[in-house]
Image (cartoon, rainbow, N blue to C red):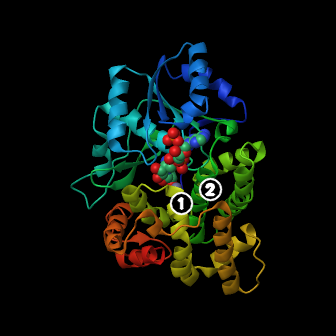
Amino acid sequence: MFPFEVSFPTHIYFGVGELNRLGQAAKTLGKKALLVTGGNAAKRTGLLDRVQSLLQEAEVDSILFDKIEPNPRTVTVDAGAALARLHACDFVLAVGGGSVMDASKAIAAAAKSGRAIYDYMRGNPSGTGKELVPVQEALPLLTVPTVAATGSEANNISVLTHWDTHEKSSINGPALYPKMAILDPSATYTVPARVTAEACADIFSHLFESYLISAEGTHVQDGISETLIRLVVEHSITAIEEPDNEEARSTLLWASTLGISPFANAGRGAGMPLHGIEHPLSGIYDMAHGRGLAILSLPYFKMVILEDRPERLARMGRHCFGVTEEEELAAAHATIEAVQSWYERMGITERLSDFGVTRDALAGMAAEAVTIGGRGAGHLPSSRKLNAEDIVRIYEACL
Ligand code: NZQ
Ligand code: ZN
């Protein structure tokens, strides 16, 4: 295990009904909020009305910015930041999925500094590629996640797309940690089956990516990751079949927060290579992040992990997917089959070609993956260094 430092500073309220704390929590951050939502769900489900009346009861003013699209774009962030500055908002309140929360973090940073958010994404132009400067200043942020997926509610990551160049990349920094998060599982009851499936695939990916290529001796993290993966697999199906099942939605919501946290992933000496391979896809084709990860994961398992770390695949299968094969390689193969059949049960069956991806686009996406995901290193670190040709082969296997 490698040395590590943990910061997990967001104050979390968790539980059905905890949304009622919103007014009082908001009040501690200021008198006027920029209330950020997506274009549709919060209004349609009645959540926006409820949030607005909780704010009114607590005498907190709010300015609504309801323009965040899935895979949020820099132009939208800049418009939100301009609105926050125009109305001198004290803080940002994010009510939505990962897209809304990520955009809200970026709005909070850009509103504070007055800079275009793309400046933050481009990093240090004199460096070797993507040396990002951590964001040190932002308006305070309160998050109310409405999808159990990204863990954005309690981390300091914001993933954005600059649509002019189709660059999808992340900014981070200490100022982007939400001050508070209200995790009310009932806010996720309305998430449709399709989005629930994508969300569960994303949680799974946050867990398996570093688990499969982990350093030795990460026993605590391994136990946490295995428990979370097993629970996500089990409760995903319940949540899809019974959307308002409190136990399933609560389990998925807490698993999503912990799944991308240091509790599961610190000390492994490993990042999330598959995320680096996926981001060009959602950046160009606007496909859902979790669906892209699921499609890419099967060839990644077969072409990379099966060769390099079959014992970790076998272990994940035995602990999380009920694999019983005793021989390592057979168990590793059985794990891949079990993951595939879980995706199929959730309705994830597409190929990349179903989203318009063609062979001639693969080299460009792979170059983007190693430049942005690899921060200019020319490869993505996995169980081995994945260069652009390796990544093209993974994309090809998904067409
Ligand atoms: O757009 P609206 O109207 O809000 O509808 C959304 C959207 O269509 C809908 N939805 C959200 N809550 C709902 C709901 N529908 C019904 N009931 C509800 N309660 O669901 C759709 C998807 O929402 P989105 O926020 O895009 O999904 P998700 O939470 O999966 O977030 C994905 C984004 O997060 C980034 C991804 O790249 C992607 O841009 N990520 C952020 C990370 C982070 N900050 O740490 C890490 C992740 O790996 C990921 O990269
Ligand atoms: Zn993800």
Residue 49, located in which quarter of the rendered image?
Answer: top right
Looking at marks 2 and 1 on the same chain, the residue that comes earlier in the sequence is marked by 2
Q: Secondary structure at mark 1?
A: helix
- In the picture, measured across the screen, residue 123 lies left or right of residue 266, that is left
Q: Position of residue 140 (x, y in %)?
A: 47, 30
Ligand 1 closer than 8 Å to the CB at disc 2?
Answer: no
State which quadrant residue 225 falls in: bottom right
Q: Position of residue 279 (x, y in %)?
A: 42, 59
Q: Which residue is mark 1?
A: 291
Q: Is residue 23 left or right of residue 227?
A: left
**137, above or below 274, in the image:** above
Residue 197 is marked as 2
**Residue 203, above or below 209:** above
Question: Residue 9 at what x, y percent from top left?
Answer: 56, 39
Give the structural element (helix, strand or loop) at label 2: helix
Residue 309 in sight? yes
Mark 2–mark 1 contact, CB under 8 Å?
yes
The residue closer to the viewer here, 231 or 79, is: 79
Residue 62 in the image: state x and y as whole percent.
Answer: 48, 20
Which amino acid does the dot numbered 2 rest on? Answer: Ala
Q: Nearer the viewer, residue 243 or 109?
A: 243
Residue that appears at 33% across and 48% down: 133
| x 39%, y 35%: residue | 107
As measured in the structure, the alpha-carbon distance from the residue carrying label 2 to the one carrying label 1 is 8 Å
